[in-house]
Image (cartoon, rainbow, N blue to C red):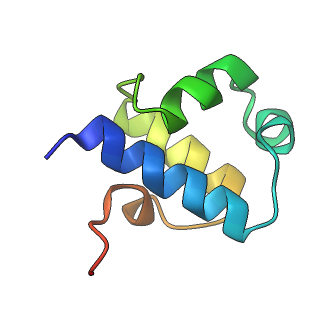
Amino acid sequence: MDMRALVGRNFARLRREKGLTQEEVRSRSGFSQQYLSDLERGKRNPTIVTLYELAQALEVSHIELVQIEEP
């Protein structure tokens, strides 16, 4: 399993479910919009601290960013 792709998919899904744009998450998190875009496309390898900070910006548990979705 490609964890970068999993985190990217989960991040994008959670962001959309919250009705947030990448720009709004950028403002909340301090990460650049380019970083967030790369993350959603599975091109970034975020640290544990980054996952926690992104989860805080989305107001979700950091576990949700690495959780495998059930079919």
Q: Nearer the viewer, residue 29 or 10?
A: 10
Q: Residue at x 31, y 65 (%)?
A: 67
Quadrant assignment for the C terminus: bottom left
The picture quadrant where one finds residue 65 is bottom left
Compared with residue 12, is residue 53 higher up or lower down, i.e. above or below?
A: above
Side of 23 where 56 appears, left or right: left
Side of 57 where 60 appears, left or right: left
Side of 67 where 46 appears, left or right: right
Q: Is residue 32 visible?
A: no
Q: x%, y% of residue 14?
A: 60, 63
The picture quadrant where one finds residue 4 is top left
Q: x%, y% of residue 48?
A: 36, 38
Q: Residue at x 54, y 24 (%)?
A: 38
Q: x%, y% of residue 37?
A: 62, 28
Q: Is residue 66 visible?
A: yes
Q: x%, y% of residue 24?
A: 86, 43
Extreme-left residue of the structure: 1
Q: Residue at x 63, y 54 (%)?
A: 56
Compared with residue 66, is residue 7 higher up or lower down, i.e. above or below?
A: above
Compared with residue 16, is residue 1 higher up or lower down, i.e. above or below?
A: above
